Amino acid sequence: MNKLNYNPDVLTCLANLSNDEVFTPPNIANQMLDTLPQELWSNPKATFLDPFTKSGVFLREIAKRLLKGLETQIPDLQERINHIMQNQIFGIGITELTSLLARRTLYCTKNANGEYSVVTGFKSENGNIHFENIPHTWENGKCTYCGANQDIYDRDDSLETHAYQFIHNKNPFKNMQFDVIIGNPPYQLNDGGGTGSSAKPLYHLFVQQAKKLRPHYLCMIIPSRWFVGGKGLDDFRDEMLNDKRMKEIHDFPNASECFPGISLEGGVNYFLWDREYRGDCLIKTYENEECISEMKRPLKEKDTDVFIRYNKAISILRKVQKFNEDSFSKIVSSRKPFGLSSTIKGNTKPYVKNENIKLYQTKGTGYIKKEDIFQNEHWINEHKVYVGKAYGMGNQPPYKVINNPIYGEPNTACTETYLLIGAFKDKNRCENVISYMETKFFRNLLLLKKSTQNTTKSTYEFIPIQNFDEEWTDEKLYKKYNLTEEEINYIESMVRPMDN
């Protein structure tokens, strides 16, 4: 590329700047707009709202499409611009800065009625892009609208409160009927307990509020963690999976394909919700900027309460379910198998004159007194298997999915770092369980409910229990469940061999 002639889209550059506010690149915004009916772009009465605008990219790309689509109906360019900007396109900034940025993007100046504005009819400097810095509504230390922690977000009036208008009953356009609501909402709030998967999700509140406005079409790009629920998302997951108006889901297991430089475990997806639609949902999965799978199917499979994101896994799961076997989750412990948090560290050497228990802990082992274990003491002298509760899989297949399981001999315990599998009558059974857990078949089924680095008892729900009097291999499992060559190739492509 000739660098002297390289003139990048500033909104593409901006999309790569920050982890705090995830800006949408123009190409992703246009892919989302492509899901909408094309006749909208030639309809002078169609209205569009981005209720959480950041860079203004959605508003700009909508304006470009309308400018072209309405050319024959409104031939005069200035009249067409005025009509589109004043009557068809609306936005709400998530901060004062993003509202100014969005006005600059759409009107070519931060003041919509300014000298350099491309619109000649606005009387207010805000135009149709609104922002108001509003307070949270506190009750018992939490915001009644978004659940924000008062200790963190009860700030000076001059500071950003992250009390977003759209979900705090301050929507300036709440009396309008929109044909399309589209955008990229804020994803989470720091609740004092951490960030990433431990922060409080927020995006579902924007989806729910948008549905209440009853637009004809709703299109948003959000994290894919809702597929399996979890922290504050179980009810939202159920709502989405039972909503027959969900027309399309475009799934990106690797979030960086949408947001370069952003690490978001579990990936992202954008969806199209159609108020008049009733039926199965079109599921498209993307890898390396290409659609690798496409299938129209129900959002909920039989006897499941989560969304199975991988189309090619559906036939495998159905074959497994036909055997009607008990779930492996029945022999998986809850978190903190012995009531010991991950911060506990055992003594580096055995205690003198005490009954010592070998403790499997973060980054190794130590020793703990038997009297310091108050939960599930009966497991201490059993044969069992330990497996790490958390494992970061990375962004692209093939995945390892879990850490190597290890044999937990009698007279041992573990901290919250591990889940416990068992207990079993002897070491041989444990080794057969480990052989099963190390198969690609096992880990592929685990992958269907694993959307973050953490696993829980319920994550193992789709995995059937086997006869652990014998060792297990992928070949035996593929034959038992009568998997086709295509299904086997899919598993082999998704899960890599266990390393030692």
Image: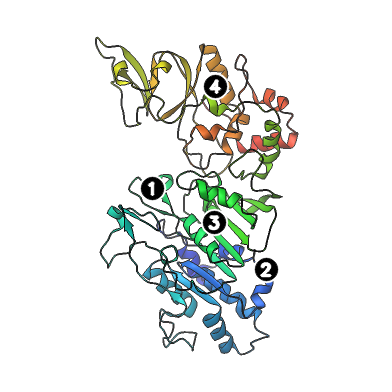
Q: Which class describes the residues within 10 Å of circle 4: few (<14), some (14-19), or many (20+)? A: many
Residue 310 lies, in percent from the top left, at 64, 44
Q: Amino acid at mark 3?
A: Cys
Q: Earlier in the sequence, mark 1 or mark 2?
A: 2
Q: Residue at x 69, y 73 (%)?
A: 39
Please give left or right for residue 336 compared with residue 64 in the image. Answer: left
Q: Nearer the viewer, mark 3 or mark 4?
A: 4
The residue tagged 2 is 37
Which label was assigned to residue 195?
Answer: 1
Q: Earlier in the sequence, mark 1 or mark 3?
A: 1
In the depicted structure, whether residue 20 falls above or below residue 360: below
What secondary structure is found at the residue carrying circle 4? helix
Residue 1 lies, in percent from the top left, at 56, 65
Kindly indicate the quadrant of the structure image that contains residue 350: top left
The residue tagged 4 is 434
Q: Nearer the viewer, mark 2 or mark 4?
A: 2
Please give left or right for residue 415 compared with residue 76 in the image. Answer: left
What secondary structure is found at the residue carrying circle 1? loop
Q: Earlier in the sequence, mark 3 or mark 4?
A: 3
Q: Earlier in the sequence, mark 4 or mark 1?
A: 1
Q: Amino acid at mark 1?
A: Thr
Q: Amino acid at mark 4?
A: Ile
Q: Is residue 454 visible?
A: yes
Please give left or right for residue 425 compared with residue 150 in the image. Answer: right
Q: Mark 2 to mark 4: distance in Å?
A: 52 Å
The residue tagged 3 is 258
Residue 15 lies, in percent from the top left, at 47, 62
